Amino acid sequence: MMKEIYQVPTSQSLQGDVIISGAKNAVLPLMAATLLCRGISIINNVPQLDDVNTMAEVLRYLGAKVEHQNSSLTIDTRECDGYQAPYHLVTKMRASIYVLGPLLARLGQASVALPGGCAWGPRPVDLHIAGMQALSAKVELSHGNIHAHAGRLQGADFTFSISSVGATVNLLLASVLADGTTRLFNAAIEPEIDNLVDQLNAMGAQIFGKGTSTLVIEGVTELKAATIDAIPDRIEAGTYLIAGAITQGKVTVKQVQPAHLTALIDSLTATGTLICCEDDSITIDAQQRALQPISIKTGPYPLFATDLQPQWMALCVSLTGVSQVTDTIYPDRFQHVAELCRLGANIRVKGNTACIIGTPNLSGAPVKASDLRAGAALILAGLIASDYTEISDIHHLDRGYQNLIGKFATLGATIKRSHHPVATNQAIAAPLLSLCG
Ligand code: UD1
């Protein structure tokens, strides 16, 4: 049997420009929003990623026609009447739950599999459900599914007990077609939410308070198809900026919105790198600079993004000195720690904080990507580890990094994707048998 791996050799300082793709975490809600109308919607700046393909599969399952050409996605929902999102699709990607709100709003019913946990914890969806109930939906949980019914949803006030990107998306998608006014308090203010608000308003919704934690939605009876551009992927951009820092290189990320990366830029500056922002690009210059590790704590936007926490840890691991990384969003998001330690990192985790004693002497080893951003962290660490780092379970990276090999190649790193033999039970059993025999 063969498995695919990334082989990451020790790299020189990365140098050059990299064009950043559209944000998958923006595209997924934009795709779900097309279910709110019957028409042909277009989303531009869409990356070719497994998560986008999974959401396309969900929409097709519901009856939509979806085409992805170059970076444009055309979604035809004129004959889209399905209301069930099954487990085999939802389990591939949690964001499939975004179809709950629009199906309930337009069709009055939805049956969506509960997404379950993920690599770093249980990740509940109680806020999504409580929000639908606040809009007068009847919700039952049975056989691992969320079954929701409503006549027309009724506008209401709803306060998120904690800031949740996904629950804010779902409540926006449900309330735009509700009867009357909905007010969402403590709503998430991530840039991906603003992108969704722009799309919904272009479809004819009446949403006020964009960019703030209080969103007011005046329900309308019908929405029309629209065209929207997905915003740039701030997490992809951040990953390449950290790649510039960790290899002490000079990297420019292009087609980005620097304002979306303030927390990372501040932290990178504090390490001792030089950062220069222009309208739609950011350059990091870490050449011949003695960098120091900087402690970070993740939080809701605009604080440090949890989706950049593993990559940041890879940087701290490689710099001489002591630092701490605290994740307040996902206290268990430390699956990458054990793998970084296989490369020679010295990390202790206590509660939601990792204490890191950095060393520039990492050495390549076979490691496993436990999830998307953990995989990115291993690539970054592999760039400065001696010899080769071989990363397995790289399907996780296909969920979120378009053309990863090509983009690193433009910066001078020659990462290879190759097939690697996996020991089967038979292959393992044979020598054991001969030992026993
Ligand atoms: C989104 C992102 C993910 C990112 C996360 C936090 C997408 C597709 N995914 O995930 O990459 O890591 O935001 O920035 O955009 N929570 C509850 N109950 C709920 C919902 C969430 O307790 O019903 C908790 C979560 O366990 C977590 C916190 O709220 O501790 C924030 O999670 P949330 O913002 O909802 O994350 P996602 O939308 O799932």
Image: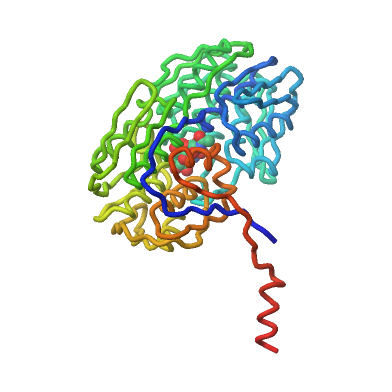
Kindly indicate the quadrant of the structure image that contains residue 345.
bottom left
The residue under the point 47% across, 45% down is: 373
Colour treatment of the image: rainbow
Image side of residue 94 versus residue 353, left or right: right
- Residue 127: tell me if it is visible: no
> Which one is in front, 222 or 285?
285
Residue 368 vs residue 1: left or right? left
**Quadrant in the picture for the N terminus:** bottom right
> In x, y percent, where is residue 63?
75, 26
- Place residue 190 in its image quadrant: top left
Q: From what the image shows, is residue 300 above or below residue 311?
A: above
Nearer to the camera, 359 or 98: 359
How many numbered discs sit on the rendered protein? Answer: 0
Residue 398 screen position, x and y as percent: 58, 43
Residue 248: image x %, image y %? Answer: 32, 45
Residue most toward the bottom?
437
Residue 239 visible somewhere in the drawing: yes
Q: Residue at x 48, y 24 (%)?
A: 231
Q: Is residue 356 left or right of residue 68?
A: left
The picture places residue 257, in percent across and down from the top left corner, at 40, 25
Considering the image in quadrants, where does the C terminus appear?
A: bottom right
Judging depth in this view, the residue of 47 and 65 nearest the camera is: 47
